[in-house]
Image (cartoon, rainbow, N blue to C red):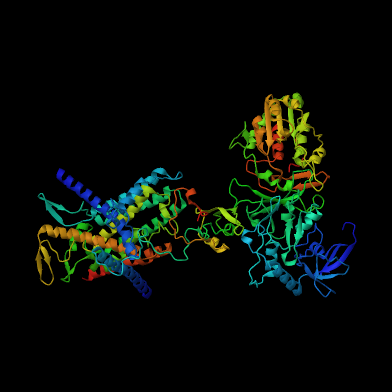
Amino acid sequence: MNGKKPVGLTIDGLKVQAAEGTNVLRAAEQAGVSIPHFCFHAGLDVEGSCRMCLVEIEGLPKLELACSTIIREGMVVRTSTDRVGEARKDVLEFLLAEHPLDCPICDKAGECRLQDYYDLYGLYASRMIEPRERRDKKVPIGRGLILDRERCVLCTRCVRFLRLVTGTGELGMFERSLRSEVGIYDGRPVDNNYSGNLVDICPVGAITAEDFRFKTRAWFLVRRPSVCPHCSRGCAVIIESVEGYPLRRSEKRVYRVTARENPAVNGFWICDVGRDGRHDIDDGRHAAVSEKGAPVQGLSWEKALAGVAAAIRSVPGPERAGKIAVVLNARLTCEELALAKGLFVTGLGLGKVFFADRKPGPADSLLLTSDRVPNAKGVLDAGFTPRLPALGELAGAEVLLVFGSYILEHFGEEDVARALAGVPSKYLFAAHTGPLDRLVDAVFPVAHPAEKSGTYINTEGVRQSFARAVRPCPAVVAEGAILVCLANSLGISLGDADVR
Amino acid sequence: MFGDVLIILVKVVLTLMWTLLLALFLTWVERKESAVMQDRIGANRASVFGLRIFGLFQPFADAIKMLFKEDFCPTFAQRALHWLAPTFSFFFVSVTMVAVPFGDTISLFGRRIPLQVVDLNAAVLFVLAMLSLGIYGILVGGWASSNRFALIGSLRGAAQLVSYEVALGLSLVGLIMVFPSLSLARIVEFQGGLLFGFLPKWGIFLQPLGFAVFFLAGMAETKRVPFDMPEGESEIIGFYTEYGGLKFGLFMFTDFLEVIVLASMATTLFFGGWQVPWLGDAGFAFPGGGRIGLPPWAVTVLRVLSFNLKVFFFCWLQILTRWTYPRFRYDQVMDLGWKVLVPLGAANILATGLILAVR
Amino acid sequence: MIKAWRVLRELVRGAAITARHFFVNMTFHTLRLFGIRTRRRGAVTIQYPEVQKALSPRHHSLHRIRPRPDGKPSCVACMLCVTVCPSECLYVEAAEDPDPEVQKLPAKFVVDLNRCCFCGFCVEACPVDAIRMDTGEIRLASLTRAGLEVPLDKP
């Protein structure tokens, strides 16, 4: 309870203990009692504008808002009485009174609180006979966000988010009472690295993202947890993908990346860099083993890997330390790094084990770090001292294994080409196509972090294990499997290292 | 001598052609008759240069289709036997027709030529023997297919055919007691007389029970619905399972040939064969005293026509039966054969013997 | 003995019924053959390609998308038909429409007749009554699989 004094109360007959200062809504949620709400968000301050979370509290004559009532010792809360039910129903009827009911074209349909709560608490017949009020349906508010004022329930979550979390405050409430609406100030659209969260937190379909707009429907999406690999923060994310019908072959699998709550790392938010990382999973991927820059259909990675093993074996044992060079990267999971250590350093005794990674980018004050790799701490943890190779060091090798094509971010393409020209056997293990493909003998398609399982250690030293979130293409294989297979064919025992 | 051989050859070819043509025609008749019975139209689309004539080209279209189908033999089957089985069936059935008299003797080029391929003195036994040899087609076909459904079908078929042969044989004993000959030509001649002075002396009037047993057992011998134990197309596919194309066609054709054989046997043994009631060599002589004189060629034509009409009627009757009744269960078939037809056949012999002895 | 008699009687009755049908129908066929038109026909068969029966109004034939007055499809690409389709034969791709009253239109609406089972669930699921199966088109055949993937987005 974070050092705070525990407070005991009763919710729906359940004896509940919660930290002092918690509101009734959170306390109920912790006890497994869900109270419907629109405007309350655990990451934001309390507004109390939607009136949906009304509960009955013993000793108080009127129904109280669960979100703005702080728990007291001995409080008795009832959330499922007829009175509460009536109140919820009436609140919902007001909220839906001017709702356009364009669920068929609304992206929120399927995960919309209005829909869910109507199903759970509403189920009344509409009494509206007046024509519904028309408002702007398509207001671009910057960063690819589109505001639909008809659907908005004025919960002000978005306004509060921009004021409290990012501190930019681009959105505000304008006009009063019936005419009140959310909007941007003249000439100042939403422009910050966390704009995507507005779509996540909007409880209805008022703010939608152009990126996801009309692409698929919420109920087709399979949501699986993963960890964002785009900076060393390692935010917890949910990868939302479509598997099977109605996805057609050669289409994008991942439609959306959304934030997953993890108080130890990212709280409730992720940045737009990580959100746009969904393109990374589907775009420009290798789908088959390529040789000399052209994909070879029907060649399995196991078969192609036999060539790699043969090349390594052709270098006599004592010369290996200087003649075989390996370039790793910090996108590999801790498990894969341990395997790499066991295979290349301990097993083969190589001296030339380098690291090449993304160049650092700009950081911001909230989540995004300048380090653009997810597992920099993990590399140190595995016992490596990451060092960028000089091109001359690579040129002298007889066998070169490159994991990831990030080396091109540090050196010019021609320089790399010149350096690699003298290397007799050179192999690339990369997820994405790039100019390096043409410069090596063979390219093995490897898995994107979302397609594999493993552990990342973020910049604060938090270990996060994750499982596979997206099913990879049949030919794609995780680096871990490649390392194990290579070790097996070279007769090197990797000990008890956990392959998975 | 050479003339005799030539005559026999011509008769063999004509008989075979006529029988095969009739069987081909029957495939069309079966489709059309069943259609008309069921208020349908039936196959009517096969045409030659737009000429449809009620789909009469359908049998030829079927035959061409069967001919050009893949001659398929499953890898696990016994190839030679698989090929031999349909020919067995076909051969033994078509050969029975040699013993059937189509008409009276005719005089041509100064010779007396009986309208019958060969007048066997044990023709009844010959026909029965050939029909029972037809079992081998089924047995060999089912065995060679190496398919359990085919084997079940062929075993059931063999059991059924053997059972009904007993009834078939018994039903004819009474007839042979009445017409003391095993030659079909002689039996037909016997049926030319009159009974009680006005009724043709046909087998049906002398042996009504014998005819019933004979016809039922014969229908079972053709192994068509309602007695389709070996095929059983609604449960197992039977000994046809692994057959297709021309070989399947031969089996199918055998069925229709058997229909014709049964019809001609029923005609010959029980319905006077080529005899026309009250028609003698010189013309009609009605029991009331009226007479119509006819030239010999007209008498011959009438007699051949009479035989074919009767055969036709029995074919029609069998198709009617096939499209009227649902199929029997296996045990029902066996019950009918052993518990009804065999005792009835025996009773018929007894009754016939008693009547002959008393008279 | 009585049972046998009854069996025999029923057998004869059955044969009499089929035989009656045969002769009655044969009579009408023969009359027609000689050019005598009778009200009753010998067969109930409808000779399909030449004579066509009127389809029932409830018949499920090829799908269509109803057009709006301005010619655009009335479908809003909500994909409820895609969701409800038991044979997974529909493929809808949505597109943005400049008209804010329309907003969402199908860019692609393909029904794969290789898979469609003509259950009509899509028609029932449609919230805007855009898809219907009332074209009366029942001759759906093609020499290729691709030929049976019918695009419906151009009404």
Residue C136 position by quadrant: bottom left
Task: Estimate the x, y position of residue A94 in percent, counting from the top left.
Answer: 71, 69
Task: Estimate the x, y position of residue B266 in percent, counting from the top left.
Answer: 26, 61
Query: Is residue A486 shown left or right of residue C102?
Result: right
Residue A132 position by quadrant: bottom right
Query: Is residue B58 shown left or right of residue A367?
Result: left
Residue B28 position by quadrant: bottom left
- Quarter occupied by the N terminus of chain A: bottom right
Is A482 rendered above or below residue C101?
above
Residue at the (16%, 71%) spot, across then down: B198
Task: Name the one closer to the observer, A490 or B42.
Answer: B42
Task: Name the one closer to the observer, B168 or B348.
Answer: B168
Query: Is residue A433 shown left or right of residue B176?
Result: right
Task: Name the one closer to the observer, C94 or B220.
Answer: C94
Is residue A128 visible in this depiction of the protein? yes
Residue farthest along the front direction in this orientation: A186
Task: Estimate the x, y position of residue A10 in percent, counting from the top left.
Answer: 83, 69
- Quarter occupied by the C terminus of chain A: top right
Residue at the (59%, 45%) spot, across then down: A250
Is A430 rendered above or below residue C45?
above
Residue at the (72%, 71%) spot, across then down: A90
Is A231 rendered above or below residue B307?
above
Task: Estimate the x, y position of residue B264 in percent, counting from the top left.
Answer: 25, 59
